[in-house]
Image (cartoon, rainbow, N blue to C red):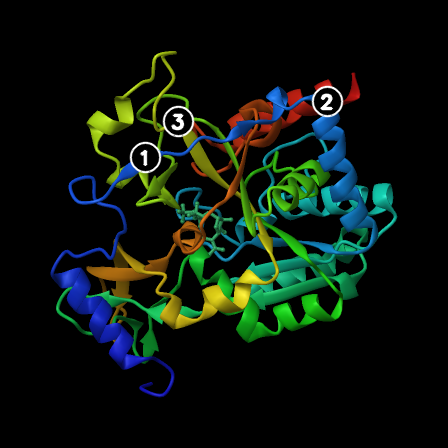
Amino acid sequence: MSEKYDIDLLNRLYNMAKNGENESFGDFEKDVILPLKGTDKDSLPEKEKKKYIKTGEKIFKKGGFAVITMAGGQGTRLGHDGPKGTYDIGLPSHISLFEIQALKIKEASEKYGCIIPWYIMTSEENNDRSVSFFEEHGYFGLNREDVFFFTQCMLPMVHHNGEIVYDRPGHVKEGADGHGGIFKAVVKSGALKNMKKRNIKWVYVGGIDNVLAYLCDPLFVGYTQSKKCLIGSKTLIKRDPGEKVGVFCTVNGHPHVIEYTELPEKEAAMTDENGELLFSDAHILCNLFNIDIFEKMADERSGIPYHVADKKVVCEDENGEKTECKAYKFELFMFDAFRFFNDIALLRIKREDEFAPVKNKEGEDSPESARKMYLDWENRRHR
Ligand code: UTP
C-alpha cells in the first residue's frame, strides 16, 4: 500500500485536518480582497460580439477546440445508483446527462464542420460503468475514437485518529481527489498528449450536471483569446447573498473564487450603489483553458492546495457488522488554479440560458428544476 500512496502527503494532509487548517487562500483580515465582475455578454456591442464569434469559429473549424467533462464526482446529494452522467432527469426523450452533452457536441461539430474531441474524466469508482453506458448507447452517435475517457487520482480517506479507513476487510476506502485533480489527471492519463497531437488550443472544462451548459460557444473562445487571457470563466449574478456558490474576487491582485463557506456573512450581503451584490459573480464551473496551462497546473510545486471535507463512512468488519465512522476526505478545487494567473476573461451570462445544475434529489438545483429550465430553454430556442 505504501507504494500506491504518497505517505508524506497523507501525513501532511492529516496534520492539517487535525489542526483545523484548511490551506485556504485569501483572508479578509490580512489580504486585499476585492470583488471581480464579469463583462455582461448582453452588454457587448454587436460588432464586438461578431468579432469574437468569428475568432472562435475559426478556431473550431481548424479543429483547435475540445471539451472536457468532469464526471468523476460521487453525486452524493442526488443519491443516484450509478455514475451521475447516466441519470435521466425525466425529459420527454429520457436522455441521460451524458447524452445531453453528447448531442451538444455533435450539433456543434456538424455546424462548424469539424471534429470536437470529448475528454471525459471519471473516477476509478465509476469509470467502467460510464464506459459501458457509452458502449450500450453507441457513443450517442459520436465517433468513439473522438471520445477519450481518463480517470482522476484517488486518495485514501483517513480516520480522525490518523488511520487509513478500511470500509471492508482488506479494502481501503478511497475518494476522488476533487475536480481540481483534473490537471494532474489530464497530464498523467495521456489526454494532454492526445490533445497536442490533435493540435487543440482551447478546451472547455465543465461538470456533467449542468444541463444548460453551452459547451461549444465560439463567442466565449473568441472573447478569452482576444483578451489575451489563458483562462476564461462564465459567471452569473448570485440569486441572493445566501446562494451556495463561490464568487469571483481578486486576492492581492490575483483572480480567485471564494467558496460560500469562506465568504463572511457581512461581505456576502454588501451591495454597491446600484443595489447589486458587491461579490456578485458566481463561479459555475464553465471554464475555458488554453492547453498550455495544464502542465504547469499539474505540477505539485504550483501548490494548488487540498481542502478537507468531513465525511461519514460505513465500515463492515469480518463478521459483516456495520459501523459508521467519521473520516477526512481530501480534495483539490479547480478554481484554486486561477490565482496563478494575472488575469481571467470573465463573461457574465444569464442563468436561464446556461445554468441548470442537478445537485439535489429535490427542491433547488434538482432534476425537477433542471428539467423545467431545459424545456423552457428548448422552447425559446425553437420559437
Ligand atoms: P460537485 O462538487 O457538485 O460533486 O461536482 P458531485 O459529485 O456532482 O455531487 P456531490 O457533492 O457528491 O453531491 C461538480 C462537478 O465536478 C465533478 C462532478 O462529477 C461534477 O460534474 N467532480 C467532482 C469530479 O469530476 N471529480 C471530483 O472529485 C469531484
Where does label 2 land, which residue? 46
Q: Check disc 3 and report its element: helix, strand or loop.
A: loop
Q: CA distance from mark 2 to mark 3?
A: 25 Å
Tell me where residue 319 appears, x and y as whole percent. Answer: 24, 74
Above or below, comparing residue 271 to residue 281 in the picture = above
Which residue appears at 43% of the width and 51% of the height?
338
Mark 3 beta carbon near ligand 1 (under 8 Å) = no
Where does label 1 land, which residue? 34
Q: Answer left or right for 11 relative to 335.
A: left
Most distant residue in the bottom direction = 3
Dot 2 and dot 3 residues touching (CB under 8 Å): no
User: Quick one: 47 or 66, which is closer to the camera?
Assistant: 47
Reading the chain from its start, which is encountered first: label 1 or label 2?
1
Q: Answer left or right for 193 relative to 342.
A: right
Dot 1 and dot 3 residues touching (CB under 8 Å): no
Q: Amino acid at mark 2?
A: Glu
Reading the chain from its start, which is encountered first: label 1 or label 3?
1
Reading the chain from its start, which is encountered first: label 2 or label 3?
2
Q: Check disc 1 and report its element: helix, strand or loop.
A: strand
Q: Check disc 2 and report its element: helix, strand or loop.
A: helix
Name the quadrant of the C terminus. top right
Residue 116 visible in this rendered orientation of the protein: yes
Residue 124 visible in this rendered orientation of the protein: no
User: Quick one: 262 or 164, which is closer to the camera?
Assistant: 262
Which residue appears at 74% of the width and 43% of the height?
56
The numbered disc on residue 280 is 3
Q: CA distance from mark 1 to mark 2?
A: 30 Å
Name the quadrant of the N terminus. bottom left
Counting the numbered discs, the total is 3
Mark 1 beta carbon near ligand 1 (under 8 Å) = no
Label 2, residues with CA under 10 Å away: few <14, some 14-19, many ≥20: few
Q: Amino acid at mark 3?
A: Ser
